[in-house]
Image (spheres, rainbow, N blue to C red):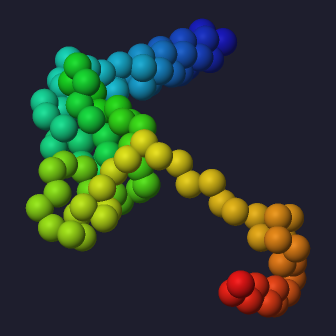
Amino acid sequence: MFRRELDRSSSLRGLLAVLLLACTGCSLVVDANANQCVTDADCVTLDSAAICQEGVCVPSGLGPPGCFLGEPSSEEQFLNRCTNSQCIPFDNCARLGLCNGAALPPLVAKP
């Protein structure tokens, strides 16, 4: 009987040790005081439009995904610049009656 209680207490101690290590394990591996970024360029790997604020990469609200962030030096960069504009799709079916692949209406003749 004494041996059974000893085995239980050893098992309980082992379980407590494992739980204690599991709870503190992350803090031993991850440096909570380290900055995620110093400049906006450090955030490019997370999101092309993320910016660095107080050592943390945060979304800038600019888009679309994959856009060019910075001062453009080519036409392609200029055309792909990040903006805060939004794309609102045009509903051809509801507004023009072009549902299920319907053809465009005939053009209006010049006066």
Q: Nearer the viewer, residue 47 or 102?
A: 102
Q: Of residues 19 and 51, which is closer to you in this image?
A: 51
19 left or right of 80 in image? right
Q: Is residue 30 visible?
A: no
Splitting the image into 4 quarters, where does residue 24 fall?
A: top left
Q: Is residue 38 visible?
A: yes
* Quadrant in the rendering for residue 6: top right
Pinpoint residue 56: horizontal percent, then vertical percent. 27, 27
* Vertical order, 104 against 98 (above or below): below
Q: Is residue 19 left or right of residue 105?
A: left
Which residue sits at x=42%, y=20%?
Answer: 23
Q: In the image, is 62 to the left or to the right of 15?
A: left
Residue at the (38%, 47%) spot, across then down: 83
Which image quadrant is residue 87 in? bottom right
The quadrant in which the C terminus is found is bottom right
Image height check: is 57 above or below 49? above
Q: Residue at 43% of width from left, 54% of height from top? A: 64
In the image, residue 90 lies at what x, y percent?
A: 70, 63
84 lies above or below 7? below
Q: In the rendering, at what x and y percent does residue 33 appear? A: 20, 17
Whole-percent x and y of residue 17? 42, 18
Residue drawn at (19%, 49%) of the image: 70
| Closest to the observer, 3 or 46 | 46
